Image (cartoon, helix red, strand yellow):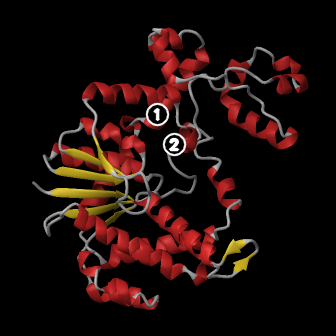
Amino acid sequence: MKKHLILDWSPILYGNLFGATSEVKKNNLVSVVDGKYNLDEYKDIVIFKIFEEISKLKNQFNLSQDDEIIIATDTPGDNGYWRKKVWEGYKAKRKSTRDDSDIQWDKAFKLFQEINETLDKCSSMKVISVPETEGDDIIFVLSKYFSDKNEETIIHSSDHDFWQTLMYPNVKFWRTTRTQGMENSEWCTLNECETKDEIQKHVIQGDPGDGFGHIKHYSRFSNDFLEVYPKMKGKEKEAYPKRFKIEKYFEDKHNKKAYNHPRFGYKSFKKSGKSVEDLLNENEIYRWNYEMNKKLALPEFIPVELRKKIIETYKTSNNKQNYGCLYQYLMKYNLFEVTSSIINL
C-alpha cells in the first residue's frame, strides 16, 4: 500500500524559527535592530533546523522510494484565507502578536517562501500551495482523497484538529507536542464515538486560537458599552452582523470590551443533560454562532472549488529530486553538515 506522509508545514517553519531565535537570544549571537533580532545573521540556523527535521521525519516513518512526502502550506489569497469570508475575526489577532514579537517577520516570511520554492524545485517532496487555503484544508482534502483510493496517509502535526481525519480508513495521525523534533509525540487514536464527541465539542466550544469563540459569544453587550450606547440594550441580534466591527471599534476608541462573553464550557454543558438542540433554542445567537463555527471548524465546509484545486495541484505536481540544486542552496548558507542528509529529501 502506498504511503503518503503529509506535513503540516507552518508549525514546522514557525517552530524552528522560534527555536533558532531562542538559541541566538540565549547566547547573544546576533545584533538587534529596532528591538528585533537580525534574521540575516541566523538564517542558516533556521534552515539547518528545518532541513534536519524533515530528514529525520522520513526515517521516523520508514518511507520507501515509492512513498511520498507532501508539504501542506498556508497560502493566503488577496483577501486572506477563505474562512475570512465566513468570519472577519478569523485569526485577526495574529498580526498584532507578530508585531509585538522580537522576530523580523517580514524577513521570516521571505525566508519561508525561499525554502518552499527550493524544496518544490529541487526535492522529490510535493509542496502544495493553493491561494486562500491553509495547510489544514490541504491535509483534510488529500487524506480523504488517498483514503478513497485505499492508500495510507500519515499526518504529522501539532494541531489537535486532525483527529477528525481518523474517521477515514487508512489514516493515521502522529501528533507532536512540540513543533520541533519528535519528543513526547505519539499516535493519536480515537474510536468513532469519541471522534464524534470531539467534533461536537470543537463546534460548541470554538477555537479561540483561531479567533472564534464558544456559541454564547456576542449574545450580551457589556455594561461599559451600554453606558456609551444605552439605546443598544437588548439589540444584540440586530448588531450581530456587525459584531466584529463593533468590538474592534469600541476597544480601539475606549480601550474597553463591547461584549461580555459569558463563561461557558463543554464539560458543564454535558453535565447539564441538555441536548444540543435544547441549548441552541435558548437564544437565536447561539444557533448563529453554532452554524458559523461548523463552517470554520469542519472539513466538509471547505469550498468545493478549493477542494478541486487542491487535488488538481497534487496531481500535477511531479517533482524529481535534484541533488545539485539542493547542494547549491545549502552551500549558499555554508551548511556543509546538512549536505550528507539531502539524499533523504
**Residue 317 appears in the rendering:** no
Whole-percent x and y of residue 202?
A: 45, 31
Q: Residue at x 64, y 82 (%)?
A: 30
Q: Which residue is mark 1?
A: 295
Question: Would you identify the image quadrant in which residue 248 lies?
Answer: top right
Q: Relative to residue 268, is residue 12 drawn left or right?
A: left
Q: Residue at x 14, y 47 (%)?
A: 149
Numbered circle sitting on residue 166: none
Q: Relative to residue 164, is residue 46 drawn left or right?
A: right
> Label 2 near label 1: C-beta < 8 Å?
yes
Outermost residue to the left: 1
Looking at the rendered structure, the secondary structure element under dot 1 is helix
Q: Residue at x 56, y 24 (%)?
A: 215
* Crowdedness near tag 1: few (<14), some (14–19) or many (≥20) residues, C-alpha within 10 Å: some
Q: Return the residue nearer the eye: 338 or 304.
A: 338
Question: Would you identify the image quadrant in which residue 124 lies?
Answer: bottom left
The correct choice, above or below, for 38 with respect to 66 in the image is below
* Crowdedness near tag 2: few (<14), some (14–19) or many (≥20) residues, C-alpha within 10 Å: many
The correct choice, above or below, for 177 with respect to 148 in the image is below
